[in-house]
Amino acid sequence: MADFAFPTNQDIIQEVQTVIGEVAGPGVQIYSEDQAYAALHRSVDIIFIKRPWEHYLRWGQYTLDGVNGKITDPDPFGDVVSPDLSDFIYVGRSDETRPMPLLNNRINPLTIGGGTVAIWGSLPISDPDWQKKRLQFWPKASDPSILVNTLVRLKPTDYTDTGVLYFDRLMLVMGTAWQILDFDGTNPNAADTCKQLFDLRFRDIEHSLAGHPLQIISDKGIPTEWFVPYP
């Protein structure tokens, strides 16, 4: 059985030009490739943030330094694009199924005692490790034998002609056509048509994924207590 050939970015752009000609009429202007790739980039930005796409996720397990509340790995998150914490889908202790809570900005983390890592947040951008390590764990002097697990979202970045964006082809085409027509502004009806098709395709994919059974994370039934942040 031959492997399926995923469309390159150039394939997507060529199909977008065809779609624009169909919905906006044969007299539509031909858009430059620079404009088209900029629209493709915007379309991927929208698609990427809509949900955590399973094939663009990565699990990791890390050791804390036991002193500064940082991960010992020198570069665990340098490829995580978002400067905020929105690309961190899960952060938790390795021996537990439920995630640790994110630090509330109105709580003083310096008051958290004990030897067990309890809460996580962001390193300040003034910290020299912010770019690569990104996360701060509290209490800082947590037992380094307690590992932490993370699930992060990795954004596709290859927008070259031969690059491949591993999203649904129709969603990419309609999203890109919508962005081009919407920014051009000369044919709002055509832009709206492409947007509706883009949204419809996303909903179809989401409904398909929702049809799979969900794993029960423990045998204790529905949790009835809050996460205990520290002993």
Image: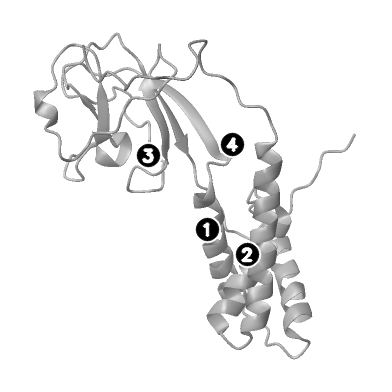
Task: Report the residue marked by disc 3.
Answer: 78
Give the secondary structure at mark 2.
helix
Residue closest to the eye, 125 or 24: 24
Tell me the crowding category of disc 3: few under 14, some 14 to 19, or many 20 or more residues within 10 angstroms, Cα based: few
- Mark 4 to mark 1 CA distance (whole Å): 16 Å
**Tag 2: residue type?**
Gly
Q: Earlier in the sequence, mark 1 or mark 3?
A: 1
Residue 174 point in image, percent of width and height: 68, 65
Q: Are marks 4 and 2 in contact (CB under 8 Å)?
A: no
Is 139 left or right of 41, judged from the image as shown? left
**Tag 3: residue type?**
Gly
Vertical side of 156 occupied by 28: above or below: below
Q: Earlier in the sequence, mark 4 or mark 1?
A: 1
- Mark 3 to mark 2 CA distance (whole Å): 28 Å
Residue 20 point in image, percent of width and height: 72, 77
Vertical side of 73 occupied by 185: above or below: below
Q: Are marks 1 and 2 in contact (CB under 8 Å)?
A: yes
Q: Which mark is residue 46?
A: 1
Residue at 26% x, 12% y: name it. Answer: 144
